[in-house]
Image (tube, rainbow, N blue to C red):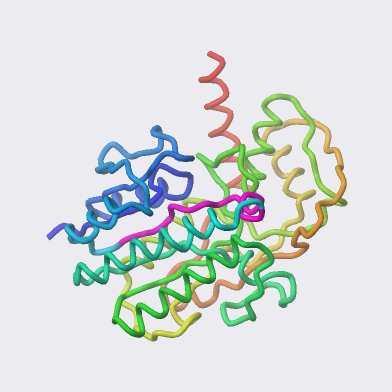
Amino acid sequence: MTRRALVTGGAGFIGSHVADALLEQGYSVDIIDNFSSGDRRNVPLAATLHEMDITSSDAARLIRESRFDAICHLAAQIDVRKSVADPAFDAAVNVGGTLNLIEAVRQSAYPTRFVFSSTGGAIYGDFVSVPTEERAPKDPESPYGVAKLSAEYYLAYYARVHGLDTVALRYSNVYGPRQNPHGEAGVVAIFCTRILEGKPLTVFGEGLQTRDYVYAVDVAQANVAAASRPLARPAQLDLRAYNVGTSRQTTVLDLAKGLRRAAGSDVPVQHAPARTGEQQRSAIVVDKAAKELGWQPKVQLEEGLRLTFEFFAARHRDKHA
């Protein structure tokens, strides 16, 4: 019998890669997306699209009345700055939307694996050792991080009290084809776009702040593993959470240099004032995902930057053809 999966946010950057990967593994794939930020070009032709919001009764009904073997929940409000400006909206989507879906899973009584896309940077904060393990103290610096951590606590509750099968994947900084160049999290996409336009790359402060950059296709494979691999069912926070990254720190300056090499470009790098409250160091340990999910990143940063720039260059050519 064909396994069936639901991908929320499946028209988005990471969600569309997850949908592709599940289809490649033989799943029948449904997608929920409200196109607030998703792109219809990203929706796989073989997937069934449901244009709706994750906070809606329609989304809950779809889950209750369908038999999904796995739900990969990627739809979210992803802009940290927006979460600071409007924390109530951020919570309504990232906590309320998740609750709407997981409660529908509970009501359906079908044994669905619920895979939640969390964050491996924003929930840990700056007061932990780097690279950071799953059990590190949680001290989010933004409403976005607070909401993601809150959703993880709800998943642990539903697993413990109602016996639901839940997994949280804590991503580091995801980059790759289809990334939105207009969002705060999309520095690689932003740099690609500026290179193609012949504009300087803006680095805030000295550019020595570090991030752990993981390629979107690798993240998609982590979702497939989390959706399908047999797992023990402990019901405490962190025991069903897995960091998804590379454990490698890369400075923003080195990222800019790597993209300029990939593009064969000599656009200048310009410095702007440091941003108040910006996290200075971030990378995550991924040993647990390797051991329990059988997952590890395969695409090295140099290759990933090349593939990403080629994608944006092709889009740029098509746009100006």
Q: At which x and y percent is residue 300?
A: 59, 54
- The outermost residue toward the left is 1
Return the residue nearer the eye: 181 or 55.
Answer: 55
Q: Is 21 on the left or on the right of 258, as rendered?
A: left
* Residue 115 figure quarter: bottom left
Q: At which x and y percent is residue 190?
A: 66, 38
Q: Is residue 81 above or below residue 158?
A: above
Q: At which x and y percent is residue 262?
A: 67, 38
Q: Quadrant of the N terminus?
A: bottom left
At a point 46% along the width and 62% down the height, the residue shown is 117
At a point 54% along the width and 42% down the height, the residue shown is 179
Q: At which x and y percent is residue 203?
A: 80, 44
Q: Is residue 289 above or below residue 66?
A: below
Return the residue nearer the eye: 278 or 260.
Answer: 278
* Residue 96 figure quarter: bottom left
Q: Is 26 on the left or on the right of 321, as rendered?
A: left
- The outermost residue toward the front is 88
> Which segment is the magenta one?
71-84
